[in-house]
């Protein structure tokens, strides 16, 4: 019988999910609101809503199939324990709740969902790791045993694969390349520290760079007409394509920061390829060219001209659902 | 029948080897000169000498045993191919040889040795990776699936284990933590670049630090009486134990550089523990205390107070031979 996996992508606004086969074909998809359930006490109702909606979707297909499992990508997800641990944007404490309430914010999501589906295998990991598995099973990393995925969104996520296996690490939270410190006393990061890679290399990072450059450079720029609050990183791509000097410099600098950081991580895991995924990576040459140049310029001799820098093969609106379903296909050994 | 593995440690001066059982007990050991064979054309004679000497050792035991394999730790060793590739201090070109001669310096050592032993399984990796496997099979990392080994000698070597497996990387050369760039435009490194971690954290690195501090600090110090050429990093430990302010500051700074670098690599592989091995690590608290402090100070929140910083459990003169033999015990699944 045909096998399908449910892939679930939990974001702060919405939760999207779909039925995916082992080739990455999506048979049906749906979505519920996550933000309807903002507080820690809303979590049980969220699980009820999600499971009911997934059952509806699962029953909507016109042919028989076996549900191979449920794979979930979510912030702060712990692969080993099947939990989501103190996520910054989900099921928060109410104002006035004491800090010790944080201990309540350990959500056994994998078990809680599996119960509603006759105990079917349910796996969970963070969204960047899910995208990494998607790349491995459905994308451009097929057949690769050692590679790195870098996801460029509001922040910078990453997944590391070595010996054909995802590196989850001892505590299940490995792969936080976005929080490698690249500049001592550098930009303030949401994590409470300074100089993290994602404060430079991400949609937010390049926006910060553009504003810094408008202060340090005197060149005219269309970007000078846009207020900070209306500013979107895609405006920098558009301006750079038109030859805007501030926008072009913003991409060069972003590529430099990313290229230097990649040269460093290559010394650790020596990957066959590094994939760039997500919004900022769609700027194409604007980002890839300086990144590649600075990566090679700073590479240890033994690794020079060996590591491919490639665009993700699973870009597009369903990448997150495919990636989450890949958790299941990976575990059953497609 | 009892099984033994030959562990071989190839250094620039000597090659040491010994017969080791799966518990790490050493039954016999011997040594030949490596530096008697300095040039690329001496390599075949080196292999002959080494194999003859290993046969003599293998025949010297008074009981019957099965040779499970030969494990070799050597600089620039490629695990995947069984080769040593353009090693800086072994089997060099003669002066006047053209640079293109480097292509000749690809040594198929694993095959060349295996031939002399009826094709027995022969595996090779760099010395830091061999030490890492030694820690995993015989030392303090027994049973750990995710850990990092840092070897502090003249340089800084490392080995990364994830999911219970050594990370060799796509090209077989992964784990070069010593060449992560930690200071842009920092100290010159033997690799031709600048600011590599090992220019700060190694026996050579702390010596450079001590000399820098004698220039920047005004405090009196016994170290000021020792000429650069006679200087040995162990003198810094001795002075620091006696309260010498320059020596103490040298260890604090070394610990800071190492601690910051470890906080960064933890975000990548999230290990259960990090082991420090080799000369400089024997300074004990002098090195461990500042390293631990700066590691935690710079750690991403989710990893704080989770990662153990521990001394190696395989210190001692036979660590390199045990580590090399561990290549075999690891591969047969002890």
Image (cartoon, coloured by chain):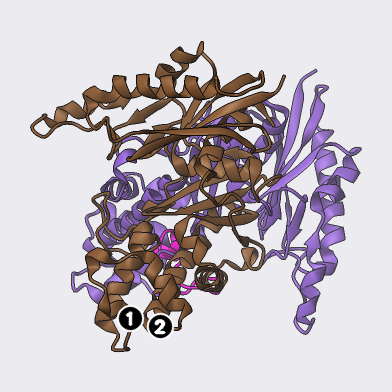
Chain colours: A purple, B brown
- Residue A12 image point, x, y percent: 66, 60
Q: Residues within 10 Å of mark 2 (few under 14, many from 20)?
A: some
First along the sequence among labels 2 and 1: 1
- Taking A308 as reference, is B185 above or below it? below
Q: Is residue B142 left or right of residue B211?
A: right
Is residue A187 visible to the viewer in this orientation of the structure? no
User: Mark 1 belongs to which subunit?
Assistant: B
| Circles 2, 1 touching at the beta carbon (< 8 Å) | yes
Range of magenta residues: A185-205
Does the magenta portion include A189?
Answer: yes
Q: Which mark is residue B244?
A: 2
| Number of numbered discs | 2
The image quarter in which residue B247 lies: bottom left
Q: Secondary structure at mark 2?
A: loop
Rounded to the nearest angstrom, the CA distance separating label 2 from label 1 is: 7 Å
Residue at the image point whose x is 77% and y is 84% from the top: A96
- Taking A266 as reference, is B26 above or below it? above
- Residue A131 image point, x, y percent: 58, 43
Q: Secondary structure at mark 1?
A: helix
- Residue B67 image point, x, y percent: 60, 20
Q: Which residue is mark 1?
A: B222
Q: Residues within 10 Å of mark 1 (few under 14, many from 20)?
A: few
Q: Is residue A122 left or right of residue B3?
A: right
């Amino acid at each position: 019988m045909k096998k399908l996996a449910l892939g679930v992508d939990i974001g702060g606004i919405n939760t999207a999910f779909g039925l995916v086969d082992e080739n990455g074909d999506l048979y049906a998809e749906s979505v519920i609101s996550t933000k309807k359930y903002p507080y820690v006490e809303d979590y049980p109702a969220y699980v009820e809503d999600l499971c009911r909606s997934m059952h509806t979707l699962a029953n909507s297909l016109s042919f028989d199939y076996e549900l191979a499992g449920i794979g979930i990508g979510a912030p702060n997800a712990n692969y080993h324990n099947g939990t989501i641990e103190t996520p910054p944007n989900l099921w928060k404490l109410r104002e006035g709740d004491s800090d010790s309430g944080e201990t309540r914010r350990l959500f056994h999501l994998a078990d809680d969902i599996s119960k509603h589906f006759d105990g079917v295998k349910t796996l969970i990991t963070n969204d960047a790791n899910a995208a990494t598995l998607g790349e491995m099973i459905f994308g451009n990393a097929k057949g690769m045993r050692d590679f790195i995925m870098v996801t460029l969104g509001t922040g910078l996520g990453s997944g590391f694969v070595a010996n054909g296996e995802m590196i989850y690490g001892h505590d299940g939270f490995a792969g936080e390349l976005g929080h490698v410190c690249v500049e001592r006393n550098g930009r303030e990061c949401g994590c409470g520290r300074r100089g993290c890679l994602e404060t430079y290399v991400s949609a937010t990072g390049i926006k910060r760079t553009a504003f810094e450059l408008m202060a340090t450079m005197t060149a005219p720029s269309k970007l000078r007409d846009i207020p900070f609050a209306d500013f979107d990183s895609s405006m920098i791509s558009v301006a750079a394509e038109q030859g805007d000097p501030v926008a072009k410099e913003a991409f060069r600098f972003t590529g430099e920061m990313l290229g230097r950081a990649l040269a460093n991580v290559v010394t650790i895991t020596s990957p066959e390829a590094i994939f760039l995924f997500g919004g900022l990576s769609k700027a194409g040459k604007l980002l890839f060219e300086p990144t590649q140049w600075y990566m090679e310029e700073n590479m240890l001799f033994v690794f020079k001209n060996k590591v491919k820098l490639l665009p993700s093969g699973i870009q597009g609106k369903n990448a997150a659902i495919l990636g989450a379903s890949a958790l299941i296909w990976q575990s059953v050994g497609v």
